[in-house]
Amino acid sequence: MTETVLLVGGGGREHAVARALADDVELYACASNRNPGIGRLAAGFSEVDERDTAAVVSYATSVDADLAVIGPESALAAGVADALADAGVYTFGPSADAARIETDKQFQRSFMREQAIPGCPEFETFDDSEAAASYVAAVEHDVAVKPAGLTGGKGVRVTGDQLTREEAVSYVRESTYDEWVIEERLIGEEFTVQAFVADGEVRPTPAVQDHKRAYEGDEGPNTGGMGSYSAPERTLPFLSDADYERAVEILEATVDALPAYEGVLYGQFMATADGVAVVEFNARFGDPEATNTLPVMETPLIDVLTAARDGEPLPELSFAPTATVCKYAVPEGYPTDPAGGTKIEIDESSAGDALLFYASVDERADGLYTTTSRAMAVVGTGPTISEAETVASDALAAAGEGLRYRTDVGTAALVQRRVDHVTELRGEG
Ligand code: AMP
Ligand code: GLY
């Protein structure tokens, strides 16, 4: 039987999900922007705000969806999974309550402490910015200051890295946020492990390294993610097998403490001098990480989703032994002063061997326009990370004027710096 699947969300991550499903299902999608890549793969596309629970449910019902997959955290936070489930549509994505593991950073850290989940840094929570600012001024070690709610990955600041302690105090005091987590700064190399979760089972996927900072050399403000790479094996060049296994154990411990959790659980980890620590959890696929993981997943995504729905054991996952490099092209000025609403030309044929995923672009009658967010991702694959990088770089000729990208993501020099950093931290040189 062909399943009818509704995909919620219109970014690069959701284009990657759509590509992973399109050959096997009857696909429908809804999002606030008309993503041309998803539009082409889907039998139908509805322009509704992905946080509008009533509109999403009404579209799901009108297309007779057998199951739904939710991409963005904003939809999870709005309770779209709950509303679809109430309407009788099985949804792969956590309830708004379970998604607090991502959407409420105070909950995330307090949960880790109470449940003794390994890898939790020292932290304090605050419900008013003045108290948080005083703590930042007084504490001895470097800190990460985090608004508790969703900020599109752009709210966190780290002292000793992006800003001085005085700047962090002013940032907290002058912000519009009230609720904060102030935590110990973790030093090391970040990596992501995403896992499919249902019925207490955890099926991890290969590790990926994302690049949050806007400019080459990890300079500039945080973004939603400028690009990412994965290796032909499950680990990354700067990780030991034990680091990867530790990350999986942490995801398993988290799911043991959240038995009702269903969907993707994304762990953002730091490989530090003392092992693996948790930077944060997300309640969905990463963006860009999904564009690395799904193209090399050999197990059909629909088999995972239907097993979760039918209460059957999740299939063991297999992945092609292939490296991937994703590079995002973003509007000029992104993320601080993005030039949204600019008409762009994307020449798909110049993407060559790379995969092209459309992200936050809007297809209008007279062409393609940027929004204020990331515009498109290209993903190169190859036997090594640096060969995949060359494929991705060559493909970026497809990004016409008005877009820029980070040239360093996935290059041999950058990956070597990651390896050297961890070696130095761990005194293994
Ligand atoms: P988050 O929104 O929690 O993912 O934080 C955004 C980024 O801030 C992360 O990807 C890290 O680069 C950085 N960050 C968050 N927490 C910490 C921490 N405790 N120590 C160092 N960097 C952090
Ligand atoms: N890659 C970061 C995120 O998806 O939140």
Image: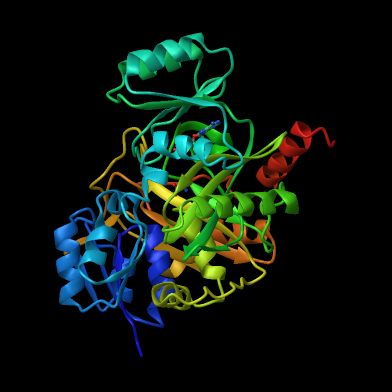
The residue at 45%/51% (across/down) is: 328
Quarter of the N terminus within the rendering: bottom left
Q: Position of residue 324 (x, y in %)?
A: 59, 61
Give the mark count: 0
In this view, the residue farthest toward the right is: 429
The residue at 84%/37% (across/down) is: 428
Q: Is residue 76 visible?
A: yes
1 up-or-down from 208: above or below: below
Q: In this view, does 260 lie to the left or right of 84?
A: right
Quarter of the C terminus within the rendering: top right
171 up-or-down from 316: above or below: above
Q: Position of residue 195 (x, y in %)?
A: 53, 60
Q: Where is residue 19 in the image (x, y as percent from the top left)?
A: 41, 72
Q: Is residue 340 left or right of residue 330?
A: left
The residue at 40%/37% (across/down) is: 107
Task: Out of 333 and 242, give the one closest to the viewer.
Answer: 242
240 up-or-down from 105: above or below: below
The residue at 33%/75% (across/down) is: 41
Task: Out of 28 and 418, give the one closest to the viewer.
Answer: 28
In this view, the residue farthest toward the bottom is: 1
Q: In which quarter of the image is residue 142?
A: top right
Q: Where is residue 319 in the image (x, y as percent from the top left)?
A: 61, 71
19 up-or-down from 283: above or below: below
Q: In which quarter of the image is residue 22?
A: bottom left
Q: Is residue 396 visible?
A: no
